[in-house]
Image: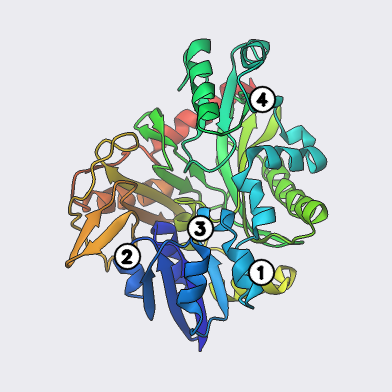
Amino acid sequence: MIGLLLIGSGAREVAIARKIKESSSSTLLYCIASTTNPQIKNLSKLYFEQSPSEVSNVLELIKNLSIDLAIIGPENPLESGLVDALEKVGIPCVGPKRGVAKIETSKAFARNILDLCSPEMNPERKEFVTVDGVEDFLRHLNEEYVIKYDGLMGGKGVKISGEHLHSIEESLAYASSIVSGGGTFLIEEKFLGEEFSLMSFCDGTTCAHMPLVQDHKRAFDGDIGPNTGGMGTYSFANHSLPFLSEKDVLEAQQTNERVALELYKQTGQRFRGILYGGFMLTKSGVKVIEYNARFGDPEAMNVLSILETDFLAICNAIVSGSIANLKISFKNEATVCKYAVPNGYPNNPSKNFEVKCNPRENNLYLAAVQKTKGKIMATGSRTAAFVGINKEINVAEQIAEKGICEVKGKLFHRKDVGTNKLINHRIRNMKELLG
């Protein structure tokens, strides 16, 4: 019997827990998370409600358990050094140590790594610790820029000119708010194009790439509204996206591979976990938007729902450095994932209301919820996701739409994720941009 520790309680971790339970190996699953997700709890031998970023408390909870492997879902425990602590007591982890997790937790670190291995993927940029020189640099970029908080803000620390920031004055105010909070930030040239996500299983020297996914960050239909953690995602049955060429895909894959090797070269630590490149196809080729050091959410639901290879075998290959010896395959099916979120999300979300759904539904993934007195209560962030799967993406979208509409509460979702109308709009955008 293999003892597995899962860290986190979101929809991403539901997807991971289900793949663990599908494994041909017999497993005992233990989970540590800040809230109780009933779908994960039902799959677990023991479930501890405890902040996984409080490392000493985690070690205390597990000291008498027989754990062979830990899988880290969210990013905050990576920054807290949980992997370093677990590996110190002999528990191998699918998730990078703090030193290499900086590829996500520090935007400046990520850009500097790219400078060393794939400089053509980087934008023109500057790092700032004060607002001195900010206005001059914004004008130098012809007011086409992105301001990024240099740290973790749950996908909400990036502000884009013309979308979130409508004047130099607004931009200076945002920069000042970061500085007054003790933070630092980057200003980068604004890329124009279509974003896509490439996640790779990584053992520190070898990457095995997953199907490409496109996320929808904006809160409302038509790609308007504030940035969110992600309102939904889609992937195609051929594991690419309709606006990408084979050359574009290969460039993204090679960039992930170079980054993994450069991280080892610069830190002496192997990146063992999920290396997630956020890319954009622009008029001048593929560029890097950002890097993450774990499965994306919702992207995890798209790729894990069609993964054919035993997930535990992949985890073991990651920690043993043997990814190159494992053939990893995914079904040739399209996926569409849609998120139901509280009214008012992300800026002023409703909280503590009951969510009515069927938690035994295999394609439903509960996220920011708390099981209290037999009821599933929303805690204020993204609440539940539903994944539609079919050879045809329009059928997958219809399945996802029907499924997410069956989740009841003070919720809304983007109806346009994965629709032909939105996908065709994005293809036209890219064609126009490329001329």
Q: Which mark is residue 283?
A: 4
Q: Residues within 10 Å of mark 1 (few under 14, many from 20)?
A: many
**Residue 375 in sight in this render:** yes
Q: Residues within 10 Å of mark 3 (few under 14, many from 20)?
A: many
Question: Label 2, label 3: how many angstroms apart (C-alpha)?
Answer: 24 Å
Question: Label 1, label 4: how many angstroms apart (C-alpha)?
Answer: 35 Å
Q: Which mark is residue 318?
A: 1
Question: Label 4, label 2: how many angstroms apart (C-alpha)?
Answer: 45 Å
- Please report contact status of discs 1 and 4: CB closer than 8 Å, yes or no: no
Which tag, 3 or 4, sits closer to the chain's start? Answer: 4
From the viewer's perspective, is residue 143 above or below residue 176? above
Disc 2 marks which residue? Answer: 36
Question: Label 3, label 4: how many angstroms apart (C-alpha)?
Answer: 28 Å
Q: Amino acid at mark 1?
A: Ile
Disc 3 marks which residue? Answer: 303
Q: Amino acid at mark 4?
A: Lys
Which tag, 1 or 2, sits closer to the chain's start? Answer: 2
Question: Label 1, label 2: how many angstroms apart (C-alpha)?
Answer: 28 Å
Which tag, 1 or 4, sits closer to the chain's start? Answer: 4
